[in-house]
Image (spheres, rainbow, N blue to C red):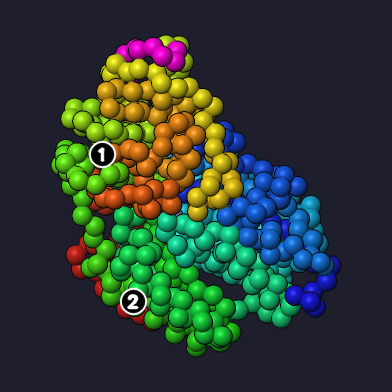
Amino acid sequence: MGKLENLKIAIGGIWHETNTFSSVKTTYEDFVHYQLVRDEQLVRRYRDTNTELGGIISELSEPGISIFPTLYAAAVPSGIIEQSVAMRLCNELVHRIKTAEPVDGVILALHGAAVAEGMDDFEAGILECVRQAVGASIPIVATFDYHANVSARMVHDASVLIGYDTFPHTDMAQRGREAARIMMNIIEKGTVPHCAFRKIPLLTLPLDQQTDSEPMRTIMSELNEIESNPEITCGSVAMGFPYCDVSYLGASVIVYGNSIESTNSAADILARKIWDSRECFSSQTVTVEQGVQRAENSSVRPVVIIESADNVGGGAAGDATGVLEALLNSSNSRSVVVVADPEAVGAAETAGVGNRFVASIGGKTDNQHGPTLKIEVFVRTISDGQYVHKGSYMTGCVTQMGRTAVVEAGNVQIVLTSLRTMPFDAEQLRCVGIEPTQQDIIVVKSAIAWKAAYGEIAQEVISVDSPGACPARAGRLSYRAMNRPLFPLDSAVTYTLL
Ligand SMILES: [Zn+2]
């Protein structure tokens, strides 16, 4: 980057994965509770973390480049974002970027599956507003999640879009560094690469999207091969977020490169590969009772039971009781379940550590996640529920679970949290005194991303098909907005490459 001097790059972002089937709207408080930072605090918070911003900051920390931090807002995946909140965040981001002007470039960390009331393509709206603010000639590079439902509108206003290449997501800082390098190349050359965007009429579920298992492993190695071509700037595969009912739901491929021909051809190869693999996205689940029974009888420990329908990282309530109830009915094994239930935390605080009381646990958010259970429990600990990520997901970042109580019913330990928390780091349990390696059964409210926390210690993994806002079968959902036909929901789907 020797030739570049006195550059000012504005950085920021808005990140949310919206589950339109969730009954809970996403409020300003949800951003406050998760990630909402401004100005220099943004650099302090994310420097040296495994986040997009961490990677952007480290790559831009060069002589001659000044970073202009604006706003970064993220909420734990949940329901549709209130319109006033979306407007407030977008307006503030744009206002702060305008304050920075003149800027030489803007780098944003987005998700790609955010939906706000009245704005079904929130990221496209953000990019349009930022584009309007900085004008046509200033490059805007944005990162997005592997679960983005990328739209043509999103592609239109960004100079380059760069998606995560991993699920579980562990390459956020790498993608941030890539975004910054591409930004510097665009500024240096004075040209924006050609773009080829392909939308594939394919809906896949998180359980089938893991990038180190087939069919994604082969697809991602094809992507690596394509990116090794010097004519190609970068390529991304976004498999989409199925719990977000928007017209442009589904898988996509975006490739950028120096020539129209090589860029189009690379995008077509990838799109064809994904389409040809469409029959291979089909994971196996068992009923909750079968899953718990199998875990009980297993000869290895710990066993992880995946309760993906209550996937907190997919916007579900985090208070489903299906697996918990089955464990209470049968368990002779030492097991642990995390349930988001601030009311039950309050009741545990009132009862006090070392005491027993009859708790009402879970099933309170809506009627999608099973009944509230009345259970006599012993209060083991109460804490502030804060931890620093030590694993590969958002390494170095702090997560707040809010006031957190560990209660026990026989061999079942229930971690009651005030805030919904994604189980992506083993510190979630360790910070409340539970050692994951010593458990017989760990229940995760997650599909795949839990592997960043427990993937290395899990000796057996069982997926159950239970009720919740992120069902393991797409057929359980009633889509209204999504463009049809879409494989595998519709029988006669054809896909013709241009
Ligand atoms: Zn994701």
Rendered view: 242 above or below 357: below
Give the left or right position of residue 285, taking residue 470 as reference: left
- Residue 78 position in % (x across, y down): 44, 41
Span shown in magenta: 352-360
Q: Secondary structure at mark 2?
A: helix
For badge 2, the amino acid type reads Lys
User: Residue 20 bears which disc, if any?
Assistant: none
Name the residue rendered at 67%, 46% in the picture. Answer: 45
Mark 2 surroundings within 10 Å by alpha-carbon count, few (fewer than 14), some (14 through 19), many (20 or more):
some
- Residue 104 position in % (x across, y down): 76, 66
Name the residue rendered at 69%, 58% in the picture. Answer: 57
Query: Residue under circle 1?
Result: 467
Q: Is residue 201 visible?
A: no
Rendered view: 23 above or below 206: above
Q: Secondary structure at mark 1?
A: loop
For badge 1, the amino acid type reads Pro
